[in-house]
Image (cartoon, helix red, strand yellow):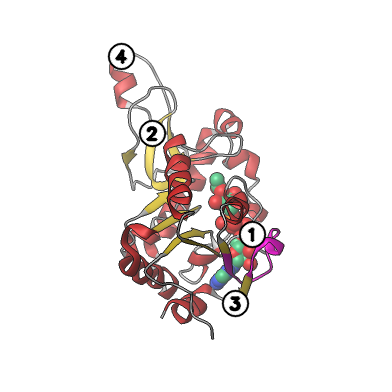
Amino acid sequence: MDRLPVDDDTWVLVLTGAGVSAESGIPTFRDAQGLWETHPVEKVASPEGFREDPMLVWRFYSQRRAGAARCVPNPGHDALVTLEKRLGQRFLLATQNVDGLHRRAGSERVVEMHGNLFKTRCSLCARAPFDDADVYAEGTVPACGECQARGQFAPLRPHIVWFGELLDPDDIGSINDFIRAGRSHKLLFLAVGTSGAVYPAAGLVNQVKAAGGSAWLVNRDPPENAAHFDRFFQGPSGVLLPQLIG
Ligand code: OAD
């Protein structure tokens, strides 16, 4: 099997999606029995859904917290840690996953594009998102203590980028800066375990190609944007990434 072509002048931007955590036991979204099959996305992952039924939303994310806390990183996550150690600042991992498994595996240069399951923020005030692994009791919605102290009720919400919401501009900035810096070197994009259905993540392959880079893909099924990649390794990332990275 080929190895990822990495030398002292190579900059690697990795994009991961739910597939990289599948072998850890975390459900994906769009596969058969994926989360969006059993949970209507507009109800549990949109600002409108939260306004309508915050209890349902907290139930969904509390269940996901409990599930993710029971899972551990797999050899795919570990291989990306190995790659980061080899490359240092010439490595950036942009993940759409909110399960925190990359950091638990030891990855440090991580941009969590879609937020973090173990962080909560206020739906009203501008206080910074805070660590929160609580699994809230069925039928409850946590309230912001800081707003309460000012005599106002404001529900807390998961620190997740929902449909219809914008990504954190700092996260976009970090990815764009990396591509800009990498374009005068050998820029390599590696996408893993993502259906290529959600933007802006799905457009990163085009951005890297426009910057003169090459694009490799590791995925169980051909994603929507498969045609944009130079190489496609089809199969489970927990097996293929250790082989590609060594
Ligand atoms: P999807 O569920 O859309 O796609 C998962 C992809 O992983 C599919 O293409 C599978 O073929 C592939 N896959 C499954 N198991 C795999 C394995 N063991 N090894 C390699 N590939 C595997 O998940 P994402 O593309 O991550 O956003 O979804 C993107 C975003 O849509 C998510 O971040 C989430 C969702 O709505 C938010 O919640 C904001």
Front disc: 4 or 2: 2
In the figure, residue 223 lies in which quadrant? bottom right
Q: Are marks 2 and 1 in contact (CB under 8 Å)?
A: no
Disc 4 to disc 1, how far (Cα)? 44 Å
Mark 4 and mark 1 lie on one chain; the one further toward the N terminus is 4
Residue 138 location in percent, x, y? 46, 43
Query: Mark 2: which secondary structure?
Result: strand
Residue for point 35% across, 36% down: 129
Q: Does the numbered disc 3 mark a residue whose Cβ is under 8 Å from ligand 1?
A: yes
Mark 2 and mark 1 lie on one chain; the one further toward the N terminus is 2
Mark 1 and mark 3 lie on one chain; the one further toward the N terminus is 1
Mark 3 and mark 2 lie on one chain; the one further toward the N terminus is 2
Residue under circle 3?
235
In the figure, residue 245 lies in which quadrant? bottom left
Q: Nearer the viewer, residue 222 or 124?
A: 222
Disc 4 to disc 3, how far (Cα)? 53 Å
Q: In the displayed image of the protein, which residue is found farthest to the bottom?
A: 1
On the picture, is 52 further left or further right than 119? right
